[in-house]
Image (cartoon, rainbow, N blue to C red):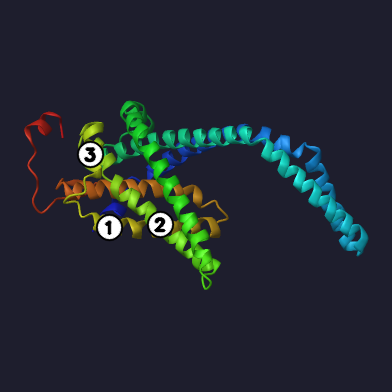
């Protein structure tokens, strides 16, 4: 039922997809501009060097000699390519400090991009919660401004943890799938890719399982940053395996839809499927939270989902307007 209710809540909030798309496009354009600004000086330094020019000329000479069948000039061109490539490698190795700073800059921009995108996720969660709880049509961008403080505090904790988790897991997957398994004689590249993709799906599902209650407990539960952080990682009585299995299925479905949107529409479908993916995940998180906390909620204007045993509202919740 969680899948069905999550899909209904998604349909009920479908217009939010376009606002999320606009917001993420703005963030992506600014991020790409910053990436280009960081990378361009390094690219110009390489492409403008004599060694790179010699490498390009050597490749051209090799291809011309190959077409003419001139074995003498093919050997000369090959030697020129080898020398130019070696010199280029030396030049790059001598610029390791500058390259390291460039990588640091790219990581910093990526972190800021995830932080700003996370503000949009928080606003989307608040809009979805208002619709589920009160049938209120809260404006996305106004909600973003109103919740900027709480959203910023949330992302200041979530983004660093997410980046560290992703870095450790993906580096581990790379070495396991493409280094360790490569040592086994009967393991080929197709098995390695299968293992890597499967591991990536599992890593994402685990992360989403343990952070699924963070936004709902902040927005609907109004627990505050510290308590919501403790609440989301405390898995006792939350049916962790069930939530994990639901996320695994949801991730595979979303991967499939996004892949189809990219392949069969030449990428244009991704403009709709990618922002929709974030909204569906948020809808599932809130449906999961409402169901477990035994709170009633709207899945559309005519349908209210009530728990079998409705939890009584406490005095504090009543005066907070919950």
Residue at 31% across / 54% down in the picture?
7
Nearest the viewer among 150 and 261 is 150
Is there a contact, CB below 8 Å, between mark 1 and mark 3? no
Distance Cα–Cα, label 1 vs label 2: 22 Å
Residue assigned mark 1: 4
Per the image, label 1 sits on a secondary structure element best described as: helix
Q: Is residue 52 above or below residue 37?
A: below
Q: Nearer the viewer, mark 1 or mark 2?
A: 2
Classify 10 Å Cα crowding around label 1: few (below 14), some (14-19), many (20 and above).
few
Residue at 33% across / 29% down in the picture?
153
Distance Cα–Cα, label 1 vs label 3: 29 Å
Q: Which mark is residue 43?
A: none
Q: Quadrant of residue 63?
A: bottom right
Residue at 45% across / 49% down in the picture?
274
Classify 10 Å Cα crowding around label 3: few (below 14), some (14-19), many (20 and above).
few
Coordinates of residue 282 in the picture (x, y in percent): 32, 45
Residue assigned mark 2: 201
Q: Which mark is residue 230?
A: 3
Taking the image as shown, residue 143 lies to the left or right of residue 79, namely left
Q: Nearer the viewer, mark 3 or mark 2?
A: 3
First along the sequence among labels 3 and 2: 2
First along the sequence among labels 1 and 3: 1
């Amino acid at each position: 039922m969680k899948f069905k209710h999550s899909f209904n809540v998604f349909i009920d909030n479908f217009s939010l997809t376009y606002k999320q798309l606009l917001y993420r496009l703005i963030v992506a354009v600014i991020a790409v501009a910053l990436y280009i600004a960081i990378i361009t000086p390094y690219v110009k330094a390489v492409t403008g060097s004599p060694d790179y020019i010699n490498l390009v000329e050597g490749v051209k000479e090799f291809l011309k000699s190959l077409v003419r069948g001139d074995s003498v000039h093919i050997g000369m061109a090959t030697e020129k390519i080898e020398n130019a490539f070696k010199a280029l490698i030396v030049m790059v190795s001598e610029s390791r400090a500058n390259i390291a700073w460039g990588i640091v800059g790219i990581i910093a921009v990526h972190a800021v991009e995830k932080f700003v995108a996370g503000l949009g996720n928080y606003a989307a969660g608040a809009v979805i919660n208002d619709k589920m709880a009160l049938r209120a049509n809260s404006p996305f961008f106004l909600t973003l401004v109103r919740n900027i403080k709480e959203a910023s505090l949330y992302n200041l904790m979530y983004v660093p943890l997410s980046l560290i988790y992703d870095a450790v897991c993906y580096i581990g997957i790379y070495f396991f799938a493409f280094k360790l398994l490569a040592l086994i004689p009967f393991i080929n590249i197709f098995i390695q890719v299968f293992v890597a993709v499967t591991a990536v799906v599992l890593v994402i599902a685990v992360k989403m399982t343990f952070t699924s209650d963070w936004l709902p407990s902040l927005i609907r539960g109004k627990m505050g940053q510290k308590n919501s952080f403790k609440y989301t990682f405390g898995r006792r009585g939350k049916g962790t395996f069930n939530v994990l299995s639901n996320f695994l299925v949801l991730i595979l479905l979303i991967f499939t839809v996004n892949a189809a949107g990219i392949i069969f529409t030449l990428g244009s479908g991704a403009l709709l499927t990618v922002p929709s993916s974030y909204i569906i995940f948020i809808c599932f998180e809130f449906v999961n939270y409402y169901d477990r906390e035994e709170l009633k909620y709207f899945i559309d204007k005519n349908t209210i989902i009530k728990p079998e045993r409705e939890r009584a509202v406490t005095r504090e919740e009543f005066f907070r307007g919950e």
